[in-house]
Image: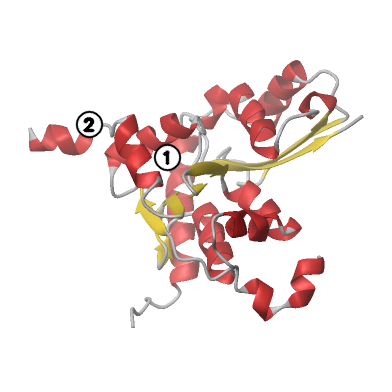
Amino acid sequence: MFKLPKNWLLRSPLQAYIRNCSSTAANSPVNEQLILDKLRGKFPKAATISVEDTSGGCGAMFNVSVETPDFQGLSVMKQHKLVYETLKDEMTKIHGLHLQTRISK
Amino acid sequence: MSLRKAYCSTKSKEEIEKLVKNNKVVVFMKGVPEQPQCGFSNAVVQILRMHGVTYDSHNVLADNSLRQAVKDFSNWPTIPQIYINGEFVGGCDIMLQMHQSGDLIEELEKAGIRSVLLDKNKNEEKK
């Protein structure tokens, strides 16, 4: 059987994550406010838009939640695509984001 | 030329299409299933393992020509990306959502794959 090195779970993603943080932090002006402003501009009717930097402030990882009537009739994938499209410039600079979309009335 | 090929070339649409149709479930990820190199990719691997799914996986970190080509192909900006029956399903968040709602079991069923969760735990279905 393939044997994993000790602590691989802890080591590899964390290392990659730290590497990514340090490499993007320097030239990445992405922050919560920037993402929030972009999303509010795109979805003015949204009931809720929340953005949380989960990378400890280095701007590489975010939790984003959007609840808006604009999503009516769209599949979850299309809802996510719409958000990604809105954050096109930011997406190239960050490592990733957790996205939650909901349809509001 | 070989250097150029390794670092500058990008896989064509046709090449990606061939990859996504090669198996019922195909995953583009960072790292390999035995050792994912990103939390998002790891989550997808764990979900598929729970359902007992066998799949093709492609490590975008090991193949630069793949990384951007896949994103362009699906019009999706992040890795991992999951294809079922040659169709783009989504990334980590959507997989997680489908797993929690039970939609993933249905989607797999459409592709002719029976999730082992159906046999393992009937309660899981009701969630």
Type of amino acid under label 1: Ser
Verify CB contact (< 8 Å) between mark 2 and mark 1: no
Mark 2 on the same chain as mark 1: no
Q: Is residue A60 above or below residue B92?
A: above
Disc 2 is placed on an element classified as: loop
Q: Chain of mark 1?
A: A
Quick one: label 2, few (<14), some, or many (20+) residues within 10 Å?
few
The correct choice, above or below, for A95 with respect to B119 in the image is: above
Q: Quadrant of residue A3?
A: bottom left
Identify the element where label 1 is drawn. Answer: helix
For label 1, the crowd category at 10 Å Cα-Cα, with few meaning under 14, some 14 to 19 and many 20 or more, is some
Residue at 42 percent of width and 32 percent of height: B73
Residue B9 badge: 2
- Residue B70 image-quadrant placement: top left
In the rendered image, the quadrant that contains the N terminus of chain A is bottom left
Q: Which colouring convention does the figure follow?
A: secondary structure
Q: Quadrant of the C terminus of chain A?
A: top right
Query: Is residue A24 or residue B48 the one in the foreground?
Result: B48
Q: Give me the C-alpha separation between circle 2 and circle 1.
A: 24 Å
Residue B102: give x, y in percent of width and height: 72, 59
Taking the spot 54% from the left edge, 53% from the top edge, the residue there is B40
Instruction: Name the residue beneath numbered marker 1.
Output: A23
Residue type at mark 2 is Ser
The chain letter under disc 2 is B
The vertical placement of B95 against A50, above or below, is: below
